[in-house]
């Protein structure tokens, strides 16, 4: 995975509290309980830890490794399993868009998966939701073939790609562009924005006011679209949040889904309804899609420092 965070005057990323950099697999075990270290084999070192830790070695991580128990496993799409995990450690927190290192007992390779749930779900229920696509990569393969209710793993939050406005920040619009399971961090942002809207409606003088949010989401087929009931519910509840779906492999059965890739014309139309002067743009998906979207956004008039993207290899 490669993460690019291009910051500028129009983009404020709340990096406060996430200054701890990953300087080696052994070093960040200092806060891990011995029980978790024994369970996950964290003492093995970085050589066998896998590509996730290598690709994210320079990115921020929270200094907490917490035990998590699987409370639900479900099929979100033909290729994606949803997993809900319960975490009782009050020091375990995250921001919308971040991911977790997942340490699985008996598996040397460390997993890396983005939350699709919002931070308020963790605060209120003590749970997070992950959407994990099938592959033969050991952590994903374990989720699809061995993970069950009651399974225990260890988690550590990381990532510099997130949406975390604070009270007092000026409102700004968001354009979110997702492909496949790249939806996960962006869905977390949508759900977090929905929560911020709720807080603002309850107390307009003391809460952050989100701007307009537009998500363009592309999946292979209609059956591959993730979390559609949840996203549609949020969009229905908050007029400022709009979701547009695309399928690239075959025509969808629903009239509110467009057949085809997300084009430059789609992006140009999206920008017409957003305030581009303070716009934040988050893009996540396969690398070829990221490059295409990024280039088209530049052609449409956005500056490089308005575009943030995360690539999952």
Image (cartoon, rainbow, N blue to C red):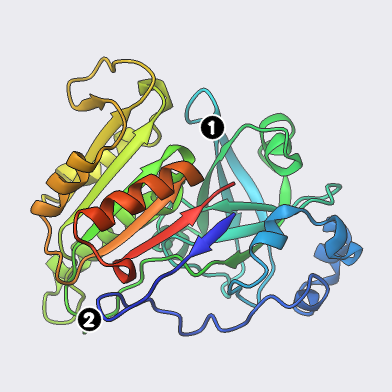
Q: Where residue 182 sits: x, y (%)?
A: 46, 45
Is residue 122 left or right of 308 when viewed as pictured?
right
Q: Is residue 182 depicted above or below 278 in this figure?
A: above
Q: Where residue 191 sits: x, y (%)?
A: 32, 54
Q: Secondary structure at mark 2?
A: loop
Dot 2 alpha-carbon crowd within 10 angstroms: few under 14, some 14 to 19, many 20 or more: few
Q: Is residue 208 depicted above or below 296 in this figure?
A: below
Mark 1 vs 2: CB contact within 8 A: no
Q: Where residue 195 sits: x, y (%)?
A: 27, 60
Q: Residue at x 68, y 55 (%)?
A: 52
Dot 1 alpha-carbon crowd within 10 angstroms: few under 14, some 14 to 19, many 20 or more: many
Is residue 272 left or right of 96 when viewed as pictured?
left
Q: Residue at x 46, y 85 (%)?
A: 16
Image quarter (top left, top right, bottom left or bottom right) of the N terminus: bottom right
Return the residue nearer the eye: 212 or 90. Answer: 212
For residue 250, which quarter of the picture?
A: top left
Q: Identify the mark nearer the N-term, 1 or 2.
A: 1
Can you tell which mark lies on residue 222?
A: none
Q: Dot 2 corresponds to which residue?
A: 169
Is residue 295 left or right of 24 when viewed as pictured?
left
Q: Where residue 140 sits: x, y (%)?
A: 67, 39
Q: Secondary structure at mark 1?
A: strand
Q: Residue at x 83, y 64 (%)?
A: 46
Can you tell which mark lies on residue 80?
A: 1
Q: Is residue 8 visible?
A: yes
Is residue 155 left or right of 311 when viewed as pictured?
right
Return the residue nearer the eye: 281 or 88. Answer: 281
């Amino acid at each position: 995975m490669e993460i690019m965070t291009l910051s500028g005057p129009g983009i404020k990323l709340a990096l406060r509290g996430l200054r701890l950099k990953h300087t080696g697999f052994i070093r960040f075990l200092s806060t891990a309980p011995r029980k978790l270290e024994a369970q996950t084999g964290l003492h093995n070192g970085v050589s066998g830890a896998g590509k996730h830790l290598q690709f994210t070695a320079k990115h921020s991580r929270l200094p907490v490794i917490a035990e998590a128990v699987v409370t639900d496993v479900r099929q979100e799409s033909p290729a994606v399993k949803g997993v809900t995990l319960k975490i009782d450690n009050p020091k375990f927190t995250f921001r919308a868009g971040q991911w977790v290192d997942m340490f699985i007992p008996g598996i040397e390779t460390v997993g890396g998966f983005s939350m699709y749930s919002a931070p308020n779900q963790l605060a209120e229920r003590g749970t997070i939701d992950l959407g994990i696509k099938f592959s033969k990569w050991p952590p994903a393969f374990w989720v699809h073939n061995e993970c069950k209710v009651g399974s225990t793993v260890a988690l550590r939050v990381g990532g510099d790609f997130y949406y975390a406005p604070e009270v007092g920040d000026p409102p700004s619009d968001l354009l979110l562009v997702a492909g496949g399971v790249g939806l996960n961090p962006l869905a977390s942002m949508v759900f977090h924005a929905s929560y911020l809207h709720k807080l603002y409606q309850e107390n307009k003088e003391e809460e952050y006011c989100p701007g307009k949010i537009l998500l363009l989401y592309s999946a292979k087929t209609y059956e591959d679209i993730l979390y559609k009931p949840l996203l549609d519910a949020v969009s229905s509840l908050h007029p400022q949040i709009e979701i547009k779906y695309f399928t690239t492999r075959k025509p969808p059965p629903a009239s509110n889904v467009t057949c085809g890739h997300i084009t430059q014309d789609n992006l140009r139309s999206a920008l017409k309804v957003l305030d581009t002067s303070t716009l934040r743009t988050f893009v996540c998906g396969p690398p070829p899609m990221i490059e295409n979207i990024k280039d088209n956004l530049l052609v449409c008039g956005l500056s490089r420092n308005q575009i943030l993207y995360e690539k999952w290899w």
